[in-house]
Amino acid sequence: MQAELNIDEQVALIRRGTAEIISEVELAQKLETAKTQQRPLRIKLGLDPTAPDIHLGIAVVLRKLRQFQDLGHQVILIIGNFTATIGDPSGKSKTRPQLTEEEVQHNAKTYADQYCMILDEAKTRVVFNSEWLDEMSFADVIRLSAQTTVARILERDDFTNRLQDGASIGMHELLYPICQGYDSVILEADVEMGGTDQKFNILMGRDLQRAYGQEPQVTLLMPLLVGLDGIEKMSKSLGNYVGIYEPPNEMYAKLMSIPDELMSTYFELATDVPLDEIRTLETQLANRSLHPKRVKQRLAREIVTIYHNADAAHAAEAEFDRVHRDRQLPDDLPEVIIPAASLTDGKIWIAHLMQQAGFAKSSSDARRLVQQGGVRLDGDRITDPGLEVSPQGGAILQVGKRRFAKVII
RNA sequence: GGGGGGAUACCCAAGUGGUCAACGGGAGCAGACUGUAAAUCUGUUGGCACUGCCUGCGGAGGUUCAAAUCCUUCUCCCCCCA
């Protein structure tokens, strides 16, 4: 559909939202060659199979890949099942736990099930890097390692920092960038995409491709989407993420919790709202002609619409307003089944009821919540942590502002 | 191979014989407020049917009326020299 764009227009389209392209000139040349030779470019993305849920952060990169596909190019997703067993140090100051083969397989399958939400399946190839890395002999590994130097590897600021902080760096971790770079050699990648945290690894791919007599891949880095906490990058392990398969209500509510300052970044990286429209919103926010909540609602609706649909987005908005603005009960409440056996004379200690509902992790925890005034049964605040209650079937237990359950005896 | 330093709760980190379930910060949770699960302020954050008891400062032993703190030993980590 966008095949008739000229090269400059294609570059401009690709540039949108990127953090860095190394280099644009090379990218233009590659696009030119692809056009004249009628050969789709191979766009590589390495996926780390530790996180089975695709979230908005990864979606930023996947959406960019989709643009390449719309321009006629081929996407190759590399499931880093081999490298995952090594543990990528990127972004973490600690050695990552190594995954078992089963976990890796399971996670990889989940990815394969999920990426089609964003990508064009017909133009996507999925490969496992164990296919070639597993086959290498120790001599092969040493020859490959000889293509770079210790000084070069230690340039990576993560390693430098850890060295300075006196943290440990496993020998195997030094090999990680080399593995990832070698993937590019094997696939003869034209472009490798990643978050800005992948810069070093992707550049290593360029070095190795040159060493193996190939034209180096273009490096295309996307900004890291900041997570819901407004501080750390969005990641599964930090729990500050929105999964693209989450139900509309969850997705909407999570998006409403991002700090206000993050709104425009989210618009830019996670929605299809045109850039000039986003600028208008920013201006209106700045001169207070538009309420921040309205803007955030729009953001949440836009994103829910992408992964579900407009109706779901509006329903989620109505639900959110009902629960959080009007303090009403949510539409469908989870149920807690209390076996009759745990009642004595029809009574149960409030702390145990809360534990059964999963709202308190211990009875001490439950006591604290009661003392802090966070617990209500059928709308009445409970103040005595030792209280025994005799809930009727269908009674509503509420802990805090957003945990509700219907008690079933 | 030699020498030195370190391991404390979800994370960072203070404490070097009793007043320690353990300062402080981050993060989480709750309350108030609101525009919302933003921001801000306050409280809270081992367990137990709890005015008390139990477990606990890398593991295992020991000294002592009393140990996160002292001793022995083990494990892991870091630094310097080679």
Image (cartoon, rainbow, N blue to C red):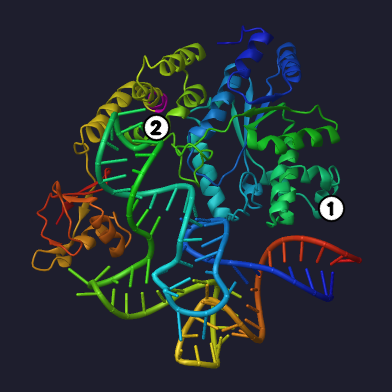
Location of residue A92 with respect to A59 vertically, above or below: below
Total number of numbered discs in the rendering: 2
On-image quarter of the C terminus of chain A: bottom left
Location of residue A308 in the rendering, given as x and y in whole percent from the top left corner: 37, 27
Q: What is the secondary structure assignment of the residue under circle 1?
A: helix
Q: Are marks 1 and 2 in contact (CB under 8 Å)?
A: no
Q: Residue at x 54, y 34 (%)?
A: A58
Q: Given the image, what chain letter belongs to the residue carrying mark 1? A: A
Query: For the residues tagged 1 and 2, is the chain the same?
Result: yes
Judged left or right of residue A330, residue A257 is right
Q: Residues within 10 Å of mark 1 (few under 14, many from 20)?
A: few
- In space, the residues marked 1 and 2 are separated at their CA atoms by 50 Å
Q: Residue at x 57, y 24 (%)?
A: A64
Amino acid at the residue labelled 2: Leu
Residue A360 included in the magenta stretch of the image: no
Magenta span: helix, strand or loop, mainly? helix
Q: Which residues are magenta?
A: A303-307
Which mark identifies residue A102? Answer: none
Q: Secondary structure at mark 2?
A: helix
Which residue is the site of mark 2?
Answer: A255
Q: Quadrant of residue A357?
A: bottom left
Identify the mark at residue A139; answer none if there is no mark: 1
Residue A166, quarter of picture: bottom right
Q: Return the residue nearer the eye: A219 or A350.
A: A350
Side (left or right) of A295 relative to A204? left
The reply to whether residue A398 is in sight is yes
As displayed, is residue A372 above or below residue A41? below
* Residue A304 lies within the magenta run: yes
| Position of the N terminus of chain A by quadrant | top right
- x and y percentages locating residue B52 in the rendered image: 28, 78
Q: Amino acid at mark 1?
A: Ala
Camera sees residue A357:
no
